[in-house]
Image: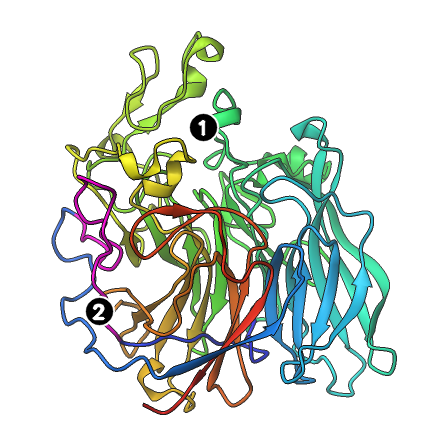
Amino acid sequence: MKQKLFGSSLLALTLLASASAGGAGQPARPIVVPSAPAQPGVHAAPNAAKPVSSGYSMRVVSTGFEMPWEISTGPDGWLWVTERLGKRVVRVNPQTGTKQVAVNIPEALAGGQHLGVLGMALHPDLLRGVGRDWVYVTYTYGSDADEKLVHKRIVRYTFDKAAGKLTQPTTVIENLPGGLDHNGGRLKFGPDGKLYLSFGELGHNQLAHVCKPIRAQEMPSAADIAAGNYDLYVGKTLRLNVDGSIPTDNPSFDGVRSHIYTVGHRNTQGLAFGQNGLLYSSEQGPNTDDEINILAGGKNYGWPHIAGYQDDQAYAYANWSAAPNCETLEFNYSNPPAEVPVVKESEYDGADYTDPLMTFWTRPKTHDFSDVACEGWTGYLCNPTTAPSSIDIYEKSFAGIPHLQNSLLMTSLKDGAVYQIPLSPSGQNARGQAVPLPGVTTVNRYRDLAFSPDQRTIYVATDSSGSMLMPNGQPSKALANPGAILAFTYTGN
């Protein structure tokens, strides 16, 4: 359980926000309410949270980070940050902003969108004086000359408190599949003492990788596992013993037990365990249908056959890799040519398919994905998605910001926002709509969040570059606080 307070946690706020305007002559871009699925009875109840005043003050804690990916509050009270492009783990004093490099990882392969030092999990016994002062880090390594040469590993370090350094690197597992895109890479401790690692599908079937098949539904054989061939771990969530071995109570898929815990994911960049024992995830969709899921062992979350709910709305599985002349075709998300096989969501009957907890922004079949506001920009910016980059939980027991209790918080790359999703008492259902927190929205790309030991401050790590949508719906590369840690402190309003 990664408690950004060091164990499990998150933040959230119950507020309403209005939709921002689109480009000239375009309808307003909806940025607040995720649409419900077509079928009744499976979406969030309509009792949306009541508005409150923003009630936050903001300060810049520290700057100069090279694509921070993970931020956690350690038991020492410092912020622990991984830098994807910086290839290091840094500790930050949250009061002064002073930075101390805990470890450099020069062997990490960094670059592109998702290559480098990624997730980090602090052992629950860190600094408790019992000899397990361990920190686990996952990163890509190899060569970016070809996707097949990219791999991931998990390494365990020992924290030397006196020196403030991570030492004694020990490889837990390696030769895990990696790629040039969609590496996932969130790493968490569960309440069961196991490590959980998210894997993307490597960006296959789109853009530069359009002719590569998505393998999120394919399973390794017993021979693959015995040989240490983990290529089919893509598009999955893994569950590992802390020594890298396969837990004996892991689920079996096609009769084979492996490190695989769940299947059918596109690009999971958020994982968080609640005190209720549930594992929540946030997953980036294609051009609609970002998802929040509750992950359970042995379950299938549908990708690429289903995005969001199985509702036959704007998404249908266009399998570009199956087109006989794929290499000659011009990729288009919403209007594939006749040579590309297209299959409706309702035609998929995969075993153990599980609906998401919530989706962000399902659109009808008739939706027009063109938007002049993004003409000449990366097309995804004006798609009806928010690009969730992390998720965490503000527990019922956290008293620092009362109106955030029992909620999920999700950071957005595109909107520079932290979204709140109130939960039912059991945590099994969403209790209202997802809304961005007023006072916690800026012109930045939000990568991850954590909060202070008194639970009154939300810390947000921002990307050091990239594009996002400003509040007026226009694209921008002029980020307000690139490569920074921001602190949003609740003022009690």
Q: Work out which quarter of the rendered image holds the C terminus and state it.
A: bottom left
Indicate the quadrant where residue 165 lies.
bottom right
Residue 304: where, in percent of width, then height? 39, 35
Q: Does the magenta stretch include residue 22?
A: yes
Q: Residue at x 31, y 54 (%)?
A: 356
Relative to 69, is 487 above or below?
A: below
Asked if residue 443 lies left or right of residue 39, the reply is: right
Q: Of the numbered discs in the image, which one, if any, rests on residue 155?
A: none
Asked if residue 182 lies left or right of residue 222, the reply is: left
Tell me where the magenta segment starts and ends, as one range. 15-37
Relative to 40, is 64 above or below?
A: below
Q: Residue at x 32, y 72 (%)?
A: 438
**Residue type (three-letter) at the residue carrying disc 2:** Gly
Q: Which residue is drawn at 14% across and 66% down?
A: 46
- N-term-proximal mark, 2 vs 1: 1
Q: Name the residue under label 1.
A: 206
Q: Mark 2 points at which residue?
A: 432
Residue 482: where, in percent of width, then height? 56, 58
Relative to 332, is 175 above or below?
A: below
**Residue type (three-letter) at the residue carrying disc 1:** Gln
Q: Work out which quarter of the rendered image holds the N terminus and state it.
A: bottom right
Q: Is residue 165 magenta?
A: no
Indicate the quadrant where residue 86 lies.
bottom right
Asked if residue 286 lies left or right of residue 27, the reply is: right
Asked if residue 245 lies left or right of residue 427, the reply is: right
Residue 376: where, in percent of width, then height? 40, 31
* Secondary structure mostly seen in the magenta stretch: loop
Indicate the secondary structure of the residue bearing disc 1.
loop
Residue 125: where, in percent of width, then height? 70, 80
Specify few, some or many for label 2: CA neighbours under 10 Å numbering under 14, 14-19, or 20 or more.
many
Indicate the secondary structure of the residue bearing disc 2.
loop
Q: What's the distance in space between the residues labelled 2 and 1, CA to CA?
A: 33 Å
